[in-house]
Amino acid sequence: MQVDDTDRAILAVLAEDARVSMTALAEAVHISRAGAHARVRRLVDSGVIMNFTIRTDPVLAGSHASAYVTLLVDQTGWQEVRARLGEIAEVEHIALVGGDFDVLLLVRAADNSHLRRVVLEDIQSIPWVRNTRTILIFEDFAGGPPPALATGR
């Protein structure tokens, strides 16, 4: 599917407020309500929009300890590692990356003791995980939509 400037404008508005009405969305991107509805449906049906979600303040939601955890993994077990990581409720994001490590995780936990358990017991117990490094997050900053959505590039 080809995404044009109007689609990118729609995505930017929805990234800011996924609950925006079709009327307000149409007005924001200067198209008809029917046109906005059709475009959103096309973006959903084509998989460009995977889901509609909310963004929470992790501390107010009870996660007082957050960290990025990097993993070195045995590549032959990547599919199983991904599946096992997906079963850990505290793992908010999983990314297979290139560079000095193989996997980058965002982990949220109730407190440091909980975070320690998740990393040392849950994650490190996965057979193909060879090494972990934990980078504590002291403060989160919420940004706007990704630059590609906002600028059309």
Image (cartoon, helix red, strand yellow):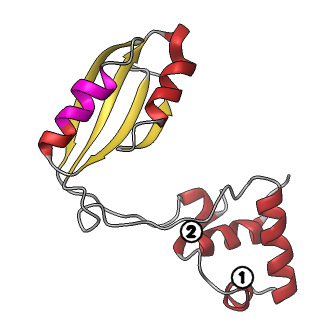
Q: Position of residue 67 (x, y in %)?
A: 25, 42
Q: Is residue 59 left or right of residue 2?
A: left
Three-letter code, disc 2 = Ala
What's the distance in space between the residues labelled 1 and 2, CA to CA? 14 Å
Which of these two is toward me, 150 or 67? 67
Residue at 40% x, 37% y is 88
Q: Residue at x 53, y 28 (%)?
A: 83
Q: Nearer the viewer, mark 1 or mark 2?
A: 2
- The residue lying at 38 percent from left, 66 percent from top is 56
Q: Residue at position x 60%, y 57% from top? A: 148
* Residue 107 belongs to the span the image colors magenta: no
User: Can you name the residue that lies furthest to the left here?
Assistant: 113
Q: As shown in the figure, which amino acid type bears the numbered disc 1?
A: Val
Q: Would you say 141 lies left or right of 114 here? A: right
The dominant secondary structure in magenta is helix
Is residue 45 in view? yes
Q: Is residue 93 above or below residue 26?
A: above
Q: Identify the disc placed on residue 61.
A: none
From this view, report whether residue 63 is shown above or below residue 112: below
Residue 121 is a magenta residue: yes
Secondary element at image label 1? helix
Left or right of 64? Residue 53 is: right
- Residue under label 2: 15
Tell me if 51 is positioned left or right of 99 in this view: right
10 shown above or below 91: below
- Give the image quarter of residue 118: top left
State the image coordinates of residue 44 (x, y, percent, origin top left).
Answer: 77, 61
Magenta extent: 116-124
Which label was assigned to residue 29?
1
